[in-house]
């Protein structure tokens, strides 16, 4: 009973903390062309915020980052909190912020760990696949340079897509999320996955060391990165401390890199010493309210800058059809108990071995 009570406290804190994150972002976005788009998936009408580098729209397909918000957050709240827009504008990236139904994602963890009874998500896997395909068909996204990132609940969703649709995106970046423990047996990507993790050692919501309850478990942040390094066949690892540019933030950063991996990919883990449930940012979106509950926010590095630098190294996904081609969408989420890996077909998006979400 004590374990279950601790779990309920933790999940309750998750909801409260991430609603504070949603309120934390009030900084104005860069001078970009923005609009809310709609996309129907079965009976669900889904929305996403589309942000283009200039008001005239792309003259040709551009590199594109799809960013997934935390639980309790909105798409525009993530835009303001993450601070991705300045780097994206400078480098000519399109940014896309999908909105989860009930502000949550069906992220691959056991349903009880996601408070499914209280916050029921939508059918998110087909939504993200269809959204990606639409961006290609509309000539907005360069199919060779589409990337996926997310924080907290959105970060878990990124990991799910990396396991299930490893060829859909060129590279992945995760902040404030670790891998569900069942991924050790059930995550089987069909290609080497370049992926970047960012996590604070003092994260009080998604613990650095992972956690276990009768409802499910998550790996530690190092074990999560090491899992993908093993799947990628990486042979070397190095640890590098970064300069403490802003000593007053109370945190420091070190980077562990797994290299010599199959296909030339890399797995990277940014360890934010004493960092809380926050993504690093050189500039503050809004100080105060969220910080005491969510912990310290690192100022030595910037999540947007680090993600773009990582993404720029990987311009060639394997599974996305070329512009104008139709990709068959899954009729239901492929992550089901006992689901089998479907046969791979060239130039099509196929789900990998299923991951239990029940």
Image (spheres, rainbow, N blue to C red):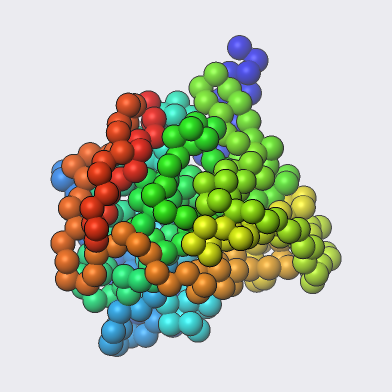
Residue 111, image x and y in percent? 41, 29
Choose top left, top right, bottom left or bottom right for residue 339: top left
Q: Is residue 293 visible?
A: no
Choose top left, top right, bottom left or bottom right for residue 120: top left
Residue 346, image x and y in percent? 24, 58
Residue 285, image x and y in percent? 59, 66
Which residue is drawn at the image coordinates 77% and 50% (left, top)? 274
Q: Where does the N terminus fall, quadrant-wise?
A: top right
Image side of residue 209 versus residue 14, left or right: right
- Residue 192 position (above or below residue 31): above
Residue 28, image x and y in percent? 50, 73
Please tell me which residue lies in front, 239 or 336.
239
- Residue 73 position (above or below residue 315): above
Which residue occupies the extreme right position in the image?
247
Which residue is drawn at the image coordinates 37% and 26% (left, top)? 358
Q: Is residue 195 visible?
A: yes
Q: Number of callouts in the render?
A: 0
Image side of residue 337 versus residue 299, left or right: left
Which residue is drawn at the image coordinates 50% and 84% (left, top)? 90
Which residue is drawn at the image coordinates 45% and 26% (left, top)? 112
């Amino acid at each position: 009973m004590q374990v279950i009570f601790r779990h309920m406290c933790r999940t309750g804190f998750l909801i409260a903390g991430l609603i504070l994150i949603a309120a934390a972002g009030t900084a104005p976005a860069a001078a970009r062309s923005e609009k809310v788009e709609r996309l129907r998936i079965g009976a669900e009408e889904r929305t996403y915020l589309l942000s283009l580098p200039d008001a005239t729209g792309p003259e040709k397909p551009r590199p594109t980052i799809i960013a997934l918000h935390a639980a309790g957050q909105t798409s525009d709240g993530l835009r303001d909190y993450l601070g991705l827009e300045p780097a994206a504008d400078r480098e000519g990236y399109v940014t896309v912020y999908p909105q989860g139904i009930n502000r949550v994602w069906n992220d691959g963890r056991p349903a009880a760990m996601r408070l499914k009874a209280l916050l029921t998500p939508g059918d998110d896997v087909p939504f993200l696949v269809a959204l990606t395909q639409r961006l290609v068909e509309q000539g907005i996204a360069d199919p060779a340079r589409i990337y996926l990132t997310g924080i907290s609940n959105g970060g878990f969703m990124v990991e799910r897509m990396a396991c299930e649709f490893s060829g859909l995106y060129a590279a992945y970046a995760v902040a404030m999320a670790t891998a569900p423990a069942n991924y050790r047996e059930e995550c089987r990507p069909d290609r080497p996955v370049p992926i970047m993790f960012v996590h604070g050692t003092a994260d009080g919501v998604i613990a650095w060391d992972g956690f276990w309850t009768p409802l499910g478990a998550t790996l530690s942040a190092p074990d999560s990165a090491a899992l993908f390094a093993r799947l990628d066949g990486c042979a070397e690892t190095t640890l590098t401390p970064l300069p403490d540019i802003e000593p007053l933030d109370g945190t420091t950063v070190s980077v562990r890199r797994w290299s010599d991996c199959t296909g030339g990919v890399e797995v990277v883990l940014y360890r934010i010493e004493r960092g809380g449930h926050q993504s690093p940012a050189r500039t503050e979106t809004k100080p105060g309210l969220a910080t005491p509950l969510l912990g310290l926010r690192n100022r030595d590095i910037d999540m947007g800058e680090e993600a773009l630098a990582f993404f720029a190294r990987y311009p060639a996904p394997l599974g996305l059809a070329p512009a104008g081609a139709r990709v068959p969408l899954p009729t239901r989420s492929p992550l089901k108990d006992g689901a089998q890996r479907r046969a791979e077909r060239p130039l099509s998006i196929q789900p990998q071995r299923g991951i239990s979400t029940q």
